[in-house]
Image (spheres, helix red, strand yellow):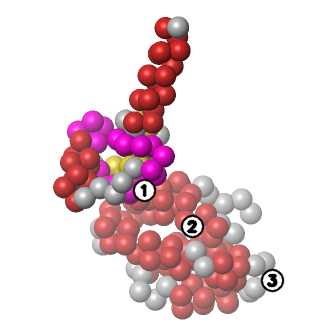
Amino acid sequence: MAGATPRRYAQAAFSLALEHEGVDRWEADLQRAQQVLRDSDVIALLSAPQVPEKVKLDGVTTLLPDVAPLIRNMVSIMVLRGDVLKFSRTVDAFTSMADDSRGTARAEVVTAVKLDDTRKQRVAEGLASLIERKEVVLTEREDPSIIGGMVARVGDRLIDGSTRTRLRALKDELAEGV
């Protein structure tokens, strides 16, 4: 049976979150469920066609006792429709919707050296201003090969202010001038 897309599941969950318990609670519960459903043994059980549906549904209840009942119901529906492998992408889509509703964006920032808290805050504020969001949540990664500066990815935007890129551009300019 062809199931829904992760985005459709996320939209349904987001609508329910607005009506029940709030988006923040749903987001936290979905992420807890996502941690459980990342386990390969759990996924194997819940997606195996030879396992009876009752066993799968009992497994969902047992594995997710601390999440809201509506979230357990959503997971159960996804299991019954054969869509449980889409759960992680559904949570990602939900998180994106929650971020949009709060005016938040997520950015991956690559620097040559680890940022201290003050610089991290300045980078987050600068990116928020640049992309016109209230807040930017940073995920950091170090890559000494960029030499200095930073590279930031916010959604599908890439902002490359690395020294490596500037040096390449300078090299290209000098090569053209010869």
Query: Toward the viewer: 37 or 57?
Result: 37
Left or right: residue 73 compared with residue 131? right
Dot label at residue 90 = none
Residue 109: image location, x then y, percent: 38, 49
Residue 115: image location, x then y, percent: 29, 55
Which residue is disc 3 drawn over? 50
Residue at 58% over, 74% down: 38
Question: Is disc 3 placed on a helix, strand or loop?
Answer: loop
Question: Is disc 2 placed on a helix, strand or loop?
Answer: helix
Q: Which residues are magenta?
A: 127-151
The Cα–Cα distance between marks 3 and 1, rounded to whole angstroms, is 42 Å
- Quadrant including the N terminus: bottom right
Residue at 36% over, 54% down: 113
Question: Disc 3, disc 2: CB below 8 Å?
Answer: no
Q: Nearer the viewer, mark 1 or mark 2?
A: 1
Q: Quadrant of the rendered structure where residue 60 is?
A: bottom right
The Cα–Cα distance between marks 1 and 2, rounded to whole angstroms, is 26 Å
Which residue is disc 2 drawn over? 87
Q: Up-down: is 33 above or below 157?
A: below
Q: Amino acid at mark 3?
A: Gln
Q: Amino acid at mark 2?
A: Phe
The Cα–Cα distance between marks 3 and 2, rounded to whole angstroms, is 20 Å
Q: Residues within 10 Å of mark 2 (few under 14, many from 20)?
A: many
Q: Is residue 143 magenta?
A: yes
Which residue is disc 1 drawn over? 141
Q: Up-down: is 28 above or below 171?
A: below
Question: Is disc 1 placed on a helix, strand or loop?
Answer: strand
